[in-house]
Amino acid sequence: MVEAHSQKQQIQQVVYRILDANLDRAREGLRIIEEWCRFGLNDAQLAETCKHLRQEVSNWHSAQIRAARDTPGDPGTVLTHPQEEQRSSITSLLQANFCRVQEALRVLEEYGKLHDANMGKVFKQMRYQVYTLESTLMGHQRHQLLWRSHLYLVTSPVDNLLETVEASLKGGLTLLQYREKTADDLIRLQRARKLKQLCHDYGALFIINDRVDLALAVDADGVHLGQQDMPIAVARQLLGPQRLIGRSTTNQQEMQGAITEGADYIGVGPVYETPTKVGKAAAGLNYVSYAAKNCSIPWFAIGGIDASNINDVIDAGAQRVAVVRSLMQAEQPTLVTQYFISQLYRK
């Protein structure tokens, strides 16, 4: 009986140590997320949600559990992973800490059942709350970055696709659309995964042209739809409220239709005739001027824009432009990206 009692006490101490470590881990991760909500987003409601969750975690951190802590005897204090030593962007930092919190809450949910019958239930519900918080916050992040993005690169098939995109990202690009109409799906999937990783390494948004299924498969930030693609409402049902949906428009009616449908942004053009849109007449600078006065969501002038005419497009009212050939075929994409951005910020 004595041995059984002693063994039970030992197991209880181990459980307390596990609870202690994961209560700390959950609270620390929530604090990191809270700081970004407070100072990065200036969002009092999201910050308050994080604070409430953090305080709820703290309420379970009793003196009894804390007393079981044995930092010198914990082999986990010397374990590390190369990915923990660097964060390439705010997005990767937030995602890492959401994962940290969710894993900790799952541990607390399971081991908590051995400590208090109610503890498992509480942390199960909290885990679902954190999933919702992550969805809301990452959607918020996407929309904020969209509003801050002034240059949008739409890819075209080139041999040095990844190199060109990375060079543009180094120049300050924050919004990329992967557009490829003819490659096999497997090739597109592989390229999309690599491009998405590149974009997120540089803190940029990654959009897929047309293909909602591909956007979901690679967890892209959104999708761009043409006038003949599926309705925005259907895409929204599939993608959820937190991903971005863009729509191409060529005239005033299409612009108003896209806004009414719930597009997050639109393309305005083609401003000039372009081989990217064979046979499509240019919408011209008048449409750019109309958008500048009437469009209530982010919009990007697109179509035949290059270094020789970007200032005409800006003078017509554009604050954001999308380009294809002028970057995809550039000898020095980094410098061209920097030039475009400098012109877009000059007003």
Image (spheres, rainbow, N blue to C red):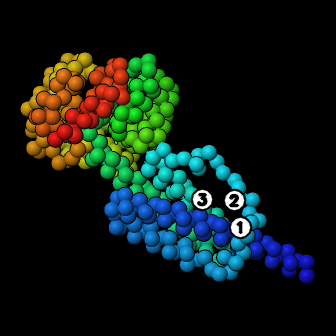
The picture quadrant where one finds residue 319 is top left
Q: Are the residues at dot 3 and dot 2 in contact (C-beta closer than 8 Å)?
A: no
Label 2 environment density (alpha carbons within 10 Å; few <14, some 14–19, many ≥20):
few
Q: Earlier in the sequence, mark 2 or mark 1?
A: 1
Three-letter residue code for mark 3: Glu
Which residue is identified by label 2? 77
Q: Earlier in the sequence, mark 3 or mark 2?
A: 2
Q: Front-most of 3 and 205?
A: 205
Disc 1 on helix, strand or loop? loop
Label 1 environment density (alpha carbons within 10 Å; few <14, some 14–19, many ≥20):
few
Residue 134 appears in view: yes
Q: Are the residues at dot 2 and dot 1 in contact (C-beta closer than 8 Å)?
A: yes
Q: Earlier in the sequence, mark 1 or mark 3?
A: 1
Three-letter residue code for mark 2: Thr
Q: Front-most of 39 and 3?
A: 39
* Distance CA(mark 2)–CA(mark 1): 7 Å
Q: Residue at x 59, y 59 (%)?
A: 103
The image shows residue 34, relative to residue 234, as above or below, that is below
Q: Residue at x 54, y 65 (%)?
A: 28
Q: Is residue 70 left or right of residue 198?
A: right
Q: Residue at x 66, y 76 (%)?
A: 66
Q: Which mark identifies residue 288?
A: none
Q: Which mark identifies residue 71?
A: 1
Q: Front-most of 186 and 197?
A: 197
Residue 232 appears in view: no
Q: Disc 1 or disc 3, which is closer to the eye?
A: 1
Three-letter residue code for mark 1: Thr
* Distance CA(mark 1)–CA(mark 3): 20 Å
In the rendering, at what x and y percent does residue 11 appear? 79, 72
Q: Disc 3 or disc 2, which is closer to the eye?
A: 2
In the rendering, at what x and y percent does residue 346 appear? 19, 39
Which residue is identified by label 3? 103
